């Protein structure tokens, strides 16, 4: 048996099978043992390939859940009789939408979909990078049928987590129970065939391990034959096809009420090992272990499709995942339900989209309100700064008036004037110590007379340089300082660089914010330039264009914040 994966989530398996009806089962969370099982007969229309009466289907689900004491708020994985299963070769490069369109176009060739739209799910079987091709398997159902089934579970408040064809669920069920003995033999890559006999057709699958290689379904009106004729018709038809499906094992599974797999085995020519199982009146033992609380005779006819539904979240390996509600599905409308008091609220993808749009609008309104608040605060601050500036200008004019008249002022007035004059310089000193971004470092500061300023430094990103420049302008909006130099520096050359840079190899930028030629760059005989270059080298940084780096430095125009 394959490795059983314990899961905290409880999935209820539900399967619809012609002749048997609706099966419901629950698997033990700790071991591959069915602890609850029962079924109710409902009519299935073999001509239209859908449930005959959805009201009867709903009633059967309610009765079975009540009988087995299963909460209606459980999660259900559903398998349905196969409607259309096929392969398609497609280019490897095309996306999901193009794949879905190709599936839709091909599925419409089936007579079932001449009058109703199909919904499909697909999975990759094989990809070839050399030929840029991919082989996919896809399963299609009637959109109207799937919609009605969803409505049934939605009305009951049951969360539907999967809808799958019984064909692929049966294959998964065979592996889950190790019905072919691969785990015991220690070889899972064996070529084997599955012959699945139903009331109006038989399907022949060719697999290598868990990979589906080929598949064919042959319509056969078994009920129109006598019992002996039916066996002969199936055996004759299968014997003509089997040579095209070379394999080491053949598993015969009969779900047709009047066909016994053990009898059919004797009439089919196959030289290798043949295994059989019945899910009909000839059933002898259940396909999986059952607990003592399950009725043995009733569980004997349990289908492997139901086992495959139960195994959907208990297997490490995904086998032929053709769940219509998965991401590869073309339905695109998987949903769940919310319980609010006595009301069941369906949550569809459309509802989720609308909620997201509403949240986006709310967030946008909140952002606008916050922006408005900051805008008002900024206007008030600007007004206060302008008021202070007007007072400073008035004081300057008074001083100039007194000095122009040759007057003499007392020492207190002189001190006051000096303090007012130096407010500008003090503001700049305060700014460089409080408004420095985390990834910006100052290397040089010059201030003369409070209004002749030169600041030099480096930063890990341009945005911090611009923000720092803007902060300086906010502190002293009347200043004519500009961003006069901004250029890229080389990568870190060594480990002696003493500024904590999180990403070695990041680009750094050197800058100068000034309204005067920096004295640092005009020393006698270029001595200051040499010292500056030496300091940069000691820091492990070098301007682009220097020795060891021939890339040109970025030349940017001076930036004025007012522009």
Image (cartoon, helix red, strand yellow):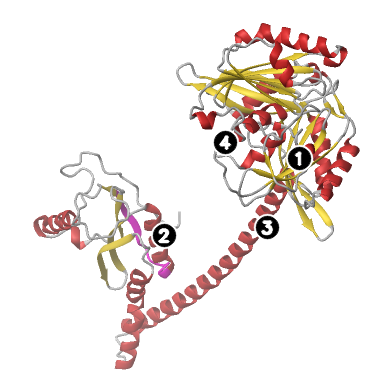
> With respect to residue 550, does 507 lie above or below?
below
Q: Are marks 1 and 4 in contact (CB under 8 Å)?
A: no
Q: If you read the primary sequence from the N terminus, does the residue marked by circle 3 or circle 2 appear first?
A: 3
**Cα distance between the residues tagged 1 and 4:** 21 Å
The quarter of the picture where residue 437 lies is bottom left
Depth check: give the residue in front, 526 or 46.
46
In this rendering, position of residue 512 left or right of residue 398: left
Q: Nearer the viewer, mark 3 or mark 4?
A: 4
Find the residue positioned furthest to the left: 525
| Mark 2 to mark 1 CA distance (whole Å) | 78 Å
Instruction: Estimate how packed mark 3 is, as few (under 14), some (14 to 19) or many (20 or more) residues with alpha carbons within 10 Å.
Output: few
Q: Earlier in the sequence, mark 1 or mark 3?
A: 1
Q: Which mark is residue 467?
A: 2
Dots 2 and 1: beta carbons under 8 Å?
Answer: no
The residue shown at (86%, 41%) is 60
Q: Which residue is mark 4?
A: 1
Residue 401's x, y, as percent?
36, 82
Tag on residue 509?
none
Relative to 356, residue 218 above or below: above
**Of marks 3 and 2, the one in the foreground:** 3
* Label located before the other in sequence (2 or 1): 1
Of the residues tagged 1 and 3, which is closer to the observer? Answer: 1
Residue ID for mark 1: 296
Crowding at dot 2, Cα within 10 Å, few <14 / some 14-19 / many 20+, comes out as some
Location of residue 549 (image quadrant):
top left
Disc 3: which residue: 362
Closer to us: 507 or 349:
349
């Amino acid at each position: 048996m394959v490795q059983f994966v314990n899961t905290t989530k409880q999935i209820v398996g539900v399967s619809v099978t012609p002749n048997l009806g609706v099966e419901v089962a629950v698997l033990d969370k700790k071991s591959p043992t069915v602890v609850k099982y029962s079924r109710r007969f409902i009519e299935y229309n073999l001509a239209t390939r859908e449930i005959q009466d959805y009201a009867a289907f709903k009633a059967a689900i309610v009765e079975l859940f009540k009988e087995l004491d299963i909460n209606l708020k459980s999660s259900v994985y559903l398998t349905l009789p196969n409607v259309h299963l096929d392969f398609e070769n497609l280019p490897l490069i095309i996306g999901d939408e193009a794949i879905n369109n190709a599936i839709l176009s091909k599925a419409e060739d089936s007579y079932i979909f001449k009058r109703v739209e199909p919904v499909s799910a697909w999975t990759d079987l094989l990809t070839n990078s050399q030929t840029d091709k991919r082989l996919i398997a896809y399963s299609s159902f009637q959109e109207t049928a799937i919609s009605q089934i969803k409505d049934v579970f939605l009305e009951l408040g049951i969360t539907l987590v999967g809808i799958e064809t019984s064909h692929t669920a049966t294959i998964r069920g065979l592996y889950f129970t190790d019905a072919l003995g691969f785990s015991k033999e220690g070889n899972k890559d064996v070529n084997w065939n599955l012959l699945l006999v139903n009331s109006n057709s038989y399907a022949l699958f060719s697999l290598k391990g868990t990979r589906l290689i080929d598949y064919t379904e042959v319509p056969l009106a078994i009920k129109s034959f006598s019992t002996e004729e039916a066996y002969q018709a199936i055996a004759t038809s299968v014997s003509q096809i089997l040579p095209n499906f070379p394999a080491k094992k053949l598993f015969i599974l009969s779900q047709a009420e009047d066909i016994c797999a053990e009898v059919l085995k004797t009439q089919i020519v196959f030289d290798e090992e043949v295994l059989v199982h019945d899910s009909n009146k000839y059933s002898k033992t259940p396909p999986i272990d059952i607990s003592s609380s399950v009725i043995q005779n009733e569980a004997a006819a349990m289908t492997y499709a139901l086992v495959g539904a139960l195994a959907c979240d208990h297997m490490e390996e995904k086998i032929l995942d053709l769940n219509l509600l998965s991401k590869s599905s073309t339905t695109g409308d998987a949903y769940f339900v919310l319980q609010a008091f006595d009301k069941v609220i369906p949550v569809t993808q459309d509802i989720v989209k609308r909620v997201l749009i509403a949240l986006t609008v709310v967030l946008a309104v909140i952002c606008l309100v916050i922006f408005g608040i900051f805008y008002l605060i900024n206007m008030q601050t600007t007004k206060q700064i302008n008021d202070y500036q007007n007072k400073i200008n008035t004081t300057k004019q008074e001083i100039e008036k007194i000095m122009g008249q040759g007057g003499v002022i007392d020492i207190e007035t002189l001190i006051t004037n000096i303090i007012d004059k130096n407010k500008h310089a003090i503001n700049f000193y305060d700014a460089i110590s409080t408004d420095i971004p985390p990834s910006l470092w100052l290397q040089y500061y010059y201030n003369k007379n409070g209004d002749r300023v030169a600041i030099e430094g480096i930063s890990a990103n341009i945005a911090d340089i611009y923000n720092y420049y803007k902060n300086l302008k906010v502190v002293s909006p009347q200043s004519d300082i500009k961003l006069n130099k901004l250029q890229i520096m080389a990568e870190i050359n060594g480990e002696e660089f003493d500024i904590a840079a999180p990403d070695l190899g990041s680009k750094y930028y050197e800058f100068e914010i000034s309204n005067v030629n920096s004295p640092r760059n005009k020393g006698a005989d270029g001595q200051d330039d040499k010292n500056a270059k030496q300091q940069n080298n000691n820091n492990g940084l070098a301007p682009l264009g220097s020795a060891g780096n021939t890339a040109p430095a970025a030349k940017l125009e001076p930036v004025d914040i007012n522009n």
